Image (cartoon, rainbow, N blue to C red):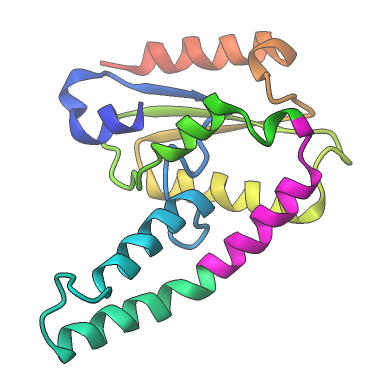
């Protein structure tokens, strides 16, 4: 959705993200994302390998500075990813479909169509403080970075928000669709 919304905004009237407006849908550098930042860091490292495209010491210096600048954000995401993997249910650790989806992540930063993002704010205790803070940062980044977006936060909702909060989700979708040209 984000790919179409950023590359071909003339082809869609709007986008609806149901508990899906996270970093894979809208990337914000201040929040970061392990998979996206890993791909970015790997590209930077590949550019400085012997025989790569780097031609002179000034260019190498710029590439190294770019890597140095990226490391603190990547380290933060790495710590979070390790914690996530250690607390995640076993059935998701090696899920082929999940890995394929994550491998295709891109930095979508310029989505120019109206969007509705409905987020679940789970009951207390479902997420730890760090997870909730990260989720809040991403919701705020989505809202700030997408001026055409309406962000809705539903308290005590489950990840399958269309089931746990069906009436609210349908009301928000109908209102959003009614606002489109």
Residue most extreme to the right: 125
Residue 28 visible at all: no
84 drawn magenta: yes
> Looking at the image, is 25 positioned above or below residue 46?
above
What residue is rendered at 28% in x and 44% in y?
Answer: 110
- Residue nearer the viewer, 52 or 97: 52
Q: Quadrant of residue 28?
A: bottom left
Spot occupied by residue 53 in the image (x, y as percentages of width and height): 14, 70
Q: Is 137 left, or right, of 121 in this rendering?
A: left
- List x then y, in percent, for residue 170: 57, 9
Residue that lies at the very extreme toward the bottom in this rendered image: 57
Q: In percent of the image, x 49 and y 63: which residue is there?
A: 30
Q: Is residue 33 left or right of residue 44?
A: right
Residue in front for this viewpoint, 52 or 135: 52
- Rendered image quadrant of residue 90: top right
Q: Quadrant of residue 168?
A: top right
Q: Is residue 153 magenta?
A: no
Residue 35, percent from left and from top? 49, 49
* Of residues 123 and 171, the one drawn nearer to the viewer in this rendering: 123
Indicate the position of residue 119 as horizontal and vertical percent values.
Answer: 61, 31
Quadrant into which the C terminus falls? top left
Quadrant of the drawing holding the N terminus: top left
Of 154 and 69, nearer the camera is 69
Q: Tell me the residue at 47%/44% (across/down).
A: 143
Say left or right for 28 vs 170: left
| Residue at the front extreme, as displayed | 51
Name the dominant secondary structure of the magenta segment. Answer: helix
Q: Is residue 64 left or right of residue 133?
A: left
Provide the residue span drawn in magenta.
Answer: 74-90
Q: Is residue 60 visible?
A: yes
Taking the spot 67% from the left edge, 63% from the top edge, the residue there is 79
């Amino acid at each position: 959705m984000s790919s179409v919304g950023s590359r071909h905004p003339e082809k869609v009237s709007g986008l609806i993200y149901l508990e899906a407006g996270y970093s894979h849908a809208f990337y914000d550098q201040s929040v970061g994302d392990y998979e996206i930042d890993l791909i970015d860091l790997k590209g930077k490292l590949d550019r400085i390998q012997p025989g790569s495209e780097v031609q002179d010491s000034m260019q190498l210096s710029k590439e190294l500075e770019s890597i140095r600048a990226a490391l603190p954000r990547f380290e933060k995401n790495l710590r979070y990813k390790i914690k996530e993997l250690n607390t995640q249910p076993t059935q998701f650790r090696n899920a082929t479909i999940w890995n394929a989806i994550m491998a295709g992540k891109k930095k979508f930063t310029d989505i120019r169509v109206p969007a509705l993002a409905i987020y679940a704010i789970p009951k207390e205790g479902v997420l730890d403080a760090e997870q909730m803070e990260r989720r809040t940062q991403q919701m705020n980044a989505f809202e700030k970075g997408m001026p055409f977006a309406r962000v809705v936060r539903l308290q005590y909702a489950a990840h399958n928000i269309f089931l746990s909060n069906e009436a609210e989700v349908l009301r928000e979708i109908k209102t959003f669709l009614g606002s489109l040209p």
